[in-house]
Image (tube, rainbow, N blue to C red):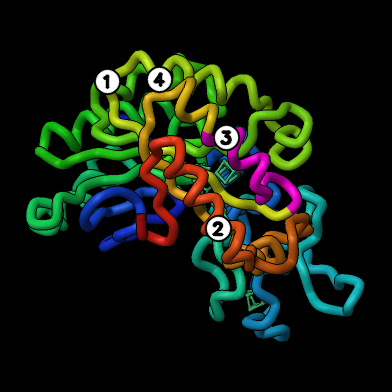
């Protein structure tokens, strides 16, 4: 049977998602809804509709004729109706809008199609020590496709990596592990209440997966997004470092200061942004956190620098 997956982006020449030069394939669907997520269009497993009112040619009416309802928000700006019944099947809108104001994000692709795109940069991977990275969304939420794509890439001598929040059942992760050269996994918090409030998920599932991974051979790098009001304080970060040292196999940690680069996409989706309005701007905290991680024997990387 032909394997298919739901992707929403493919990014070539990335240098931030594992070693060397990489192609990042973004898979749609996530089991968390982090308030700060830079890719809110990745969360739903189905395609999403984005609307940019600044690009809309108001007189054209093509989308209304196809059955889409545009309404006015409190500021008088045109926006998508939140009512799903006011939307036609998204496939009818995919290439309808002449100005690019409407875009449909997410498409079903065969494994062969994705692999062919990844293979275009084989010479770069070989020279730089790079390869394929699966991100999202949450790659392990499409477990069969993820495992099969990693296996197919390795069969082409392409090194593989996955970026994951680990908020999935263990049996979604395990089949991919034999085909994985590097796992980049987020550790966001240790406590159930703030984790639930900020992400909508169950922290124990994540922590349990970290403990299980300790007995697996796959190399692990842990990433911590530093989010003001959630985990960006030294006491919380030190507890995370202690957990990493005591309960995981990772000895490298990447600190990711909160940014707001994805904020505008919430508006395009017609959703409210519920994370802080300003990026993290606390150099003292970042350098203290790096020192504390190092004091525990961790290789701590901040903005690509150890
Ligand atoms: C979009 S996620 C996709 C992979 C997976 N779902 C995860 O959370 O690890 C990729 C990385 O971006 C980070 N990230 C997402 N939003 C961010 C933000 N606003 N500021 C800093 N890092 C962010 C995540 O913590 C994660 O390490
Ligand atoms: S089809 Fe595009 S440009 Fe035309 S009204 Fe709809 S959103 Fe605006
Ligand atoms: S787990 Fe990753 S993709 Fe999912 S909502 Fe959080 S940051 Fe976004």
Residue that label 1 marks: 217
Specify the label residue 213 is tagged with.
4
**Does the residue at mark 2 contact the one at mark 3 (Cβ under 8 Å)?**
no
Specify the label residue 286 is tagged with.
2
Q: Give the range drawn in magenta.
A: 229-241
For label 3, the crowd category at 10 Å Cα-Cα, with few meaning under 14, some 14 to 19 and many 20 or more, is some
Mark 4 → mark 2, Cα distance in angstroms = 27 Å
Of mark 3 and mark 1, the one earlier in the sequence is 1
**Does the residue at mark 1 contact the one at mark 2 (Cβ under 8 Å)?**
no
Q: Residue at x 26, y 46 (%)?
A: 132
Where is residue 100 shown, x and y percent of the image?
Answer: 54, 75
Q: Residue at x 45, y 28 (%)?
A: 245
Mark 1 → mark 4, Cα distance in angstroms = 8 Å
Specify the label residue 240 is tagged with.
3
Mark 2 → mark 3, Cα distance in angstroms = 14 Å
Q: Is residue 109 visible?
A: yes
Task: Find numbered disc 3 in the image and state the secondary structure of the residue it sits on.
Answer: helix
Q: Is residue 264 above or below residue 181?
A: below
Looking at the rendered image, the quarter that the N terminus falls into is top left
Of mark 4 and mark 2, the one earlier in the sequence is 4
Where is residue 180 shown, x and y percent of the image?
Answer: 27, 30
Task: Find numbered disc 4 in the image and state the secondary structure of the residue it sits on.
Answer: helix
Near-viewer residue (58 or 183): 183
Task: Find numbered disc 2 in the image and state the secondary structure of the residue it sits on.
Answer: helix
Q: Cβ of disc 2 within 8 Å of ligand 1? A: no
């Amino acid at each position: 049977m032909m394997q298919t997956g739901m992707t929403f982006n493919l990014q070539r020449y990335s240098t931030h998602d594992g070693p060397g030069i990489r192609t990042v394939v973004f898979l749609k669907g996530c089991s968390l809804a982090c308030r700060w997520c830079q890719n809110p269009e990745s969360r739903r497993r189905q395609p999403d509709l984005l609307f940019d009112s600044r690009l809309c040619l108001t007189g054209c009416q093509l989308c209304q004729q196809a059955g889409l309802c545009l309404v006015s928000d409190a500021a008088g700006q045109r926006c998508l109706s939140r009512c799903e019944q006011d939307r036609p099947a998204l496939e009818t809108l995919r290439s309808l809008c002449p100005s690019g104001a409407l875009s449909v994000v997410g498409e079903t692709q065969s494994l062969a199609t994705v692999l062919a795109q990844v293979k275009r940069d084989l010479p770069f991977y070989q020279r730089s020590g790079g390869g394929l990275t699966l991100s999202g969304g949450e790659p392990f939420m499409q477990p069969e496709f993820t495992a099969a794509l990693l296996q197919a890439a390795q069969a082409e001598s392409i090194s593989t990596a996955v970026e994951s929040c680990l908020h999935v059942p263990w049996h979604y992760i395990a089949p991919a592990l034999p085909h994985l050269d590097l796992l980049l996994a987020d550790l966001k918090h240790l406590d159930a209440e703030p984790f639930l409030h900020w992400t909508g998920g169950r922290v124990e599932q994540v922590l349990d997966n970290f403990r299980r991974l300790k007995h697996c051979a796959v190399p692990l790098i842990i990433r911590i997004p530093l989010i003001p009001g959630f985990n960006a304080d030294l006491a919380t970060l030190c507890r995370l470092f202690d957990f990493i040292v005591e309960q995981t196999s990772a000895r490298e940690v990447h600190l990711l200061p909160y940014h707001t680069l994805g904020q505008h996409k919430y508006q395009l989706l017609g959703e409210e942004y519920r994370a802080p309005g300003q990026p993290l701007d606390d150099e003292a905290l970042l350098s203290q956190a790096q020192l504390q991680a190092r004091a525990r024997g961790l290789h701590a990387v901040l903005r690509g620098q150890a």
